[in-house]
Amino acid sequence: MKDEYLSSLIGRAVQVYKGGPDSNVGVLLNVNADYLTLQKEDGEIIYYKTEHIKSIRENSQIRFNSVLKVYDANNLYKADTFNELAVNFKDQTVRINGKGPESKLGTLLDVRDDFFVLSTDVDGLIFYKEHHVKSLSHSIPAATNDAEEVEEVVKVKDGSSSIAEEALEEVNKFAEMYNQIAADTTNDLLSNLKYSWVKINRKGPESIEGMLVEANEDYLVLVVNNEIFRISTFHVKNFSVNPPKSEDQETEQTTEQTTEQGTVEETVNEATSEEQTTTVVERLSAGQLATSNRSHAKRRKRNKSKKQATEASDKKKEESQIAEQATPVNTTSLPTNSVTQRRRRKGAKVKNPREEYKKKRI
């Protein structure tokens, strides 16, 4: 059922989504049961599913701006539902989910009730669950009556014919691959992909890549290295399958990477001028001089510490020798016999044995 408020905005400049990668400003061209049509100033037409739209803002400042004009509405595809609309874009180049993390540009191979199939050069076949598709967009070239512009377009098309043929071959290869695993529902499709290498969710923290060993209505089981992951089927936004590259493709990719690295190195070498070299030499010289000064200062500090320690040790030795020479002999501490001790207790006069010994010697 059409929304009366949205229908009242047809022909006006609006902004779908307040912010984020899915936000766009353009002219609202049409409103249908479960989607609306927006055309940007550059000619791109975007079909938004209304169930995912969080906000729509009317921009009154550019409502009558002549720069933002409505293009020929006869080029628009019209249908009652979003899925019926998407069928009109089969075998055409479209973008799914705007510019968000799950966005991808490719050739739409098939449209089923609960999933879309997109063919891409890099990621192979990508299967989007219909519930998680927010938008679908395509570009319409602006019409021109200038003969020179038409000739330029023809020349470009003729010059890129070989590239178009290669792209067509890639699409046909992926189409044959899809025909081997095609199914009516997502669950049946995942069952046909058992024991295949798949990638679940394109980007973000929940993205994972591994071998699919089990698939049912409730969860998927993936084996990644030595770990087993169980993923809820409801939260799977999309999944992809990419066929292994041939030896020629791997060789070409390696050659391209090597060439790019060589080009970068040559650019860096050419960018190094004589002034930059002089500046580097001066910096190195200054750094070496500072390092040398620091090492000399440390060496002088160590020598000074050693000298002070030696002087302190010699001073302590001299003080100890002087103290030993000045200390008198304590005669009371000499050992005495038991008789002398008894006499001292009785109070009798006790002769000093050392003095007696001296007298006898004299």
Image (cartoon, rainbow, N blue to C red):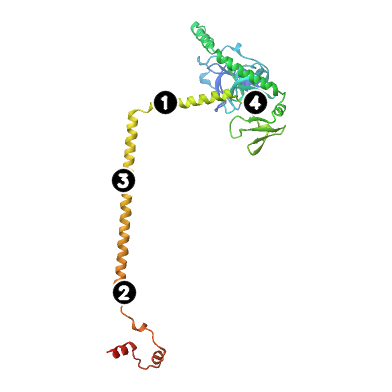
Locate the N terminus by quadrant. top right
Task: Measuring from the top left, give residue 70's x and y in whole percent.
Answer: 55, 14
Q: Secondary structure at mark 2?
A: helix
Q: Residue at x 61, y 14 (%)?
A: 76
Q: Check whether the beta carbons of the residues at disc 3 and disc 4 lie within 8 A of each other.
A: no
The residue pinned by badge 1 equals 267
Mark 3 to mark 4: distance in Å? 67 Å
The residue pinned by badge 4 equals 128
Q: Earlier in the sequence, mark 2 or mark 3?
A: 3
Q: Is residue 138 above or below residue 213?
A: above
Q: Check whether the beta carbons of the residues at disc 4 and disc 1 lie within 8 A of each other.
A: no
Residue 324 circle label: 2
> Which of labels 4 and 1 is toward the front?
1
**Extreme residue in the top direction:** 147
Residue 320: image quadrant is bottom left
Q: Earlier in the sequence, mark 1 or mark 2?
A: 1
Q: Nearer the viewer, residue 200 or 15?
A: 200
Mark 2 to mark 4: distance in Å? 100 Å
Q: Earlier in the sequence, mark 2 or mark 4?
A: 4
Three-letter code for the amino acid on which mark 1 is drawn: Thr
Neighbour tally class for label 3: few under 14, some 14-19, many 20 plus, Cα within 10 Å:
few
Task: Measuring from the top left, give residue 207's x and y in whole percent.
Answer: 61, 33
Mark 2 to mark 3: distance in Å? 48 Å
Q: Earlier in the sequence, mark 1 or mark 3?
A: 1
Locate the C terminus by quadrant. bottom left
**Extreme residue in the front direction:** 361
Q: Secondary structure at mark 3?
A: helix
Neighbour tally class for label 4: few under 14, some 14-19, many 20 plus, Cα within 10 Å:
many
Neighbour tally class for label 1: few under 14, some 14-19, many 20 plus, Cα within 10 Å:
few
Residue 293 circle label: 3
Three-letter code for the amino acid on which mark 2 is drawn: Glu
Task: Measuring from the top left, give residue 215's x and y in whole percent.
Answer: 71, 32
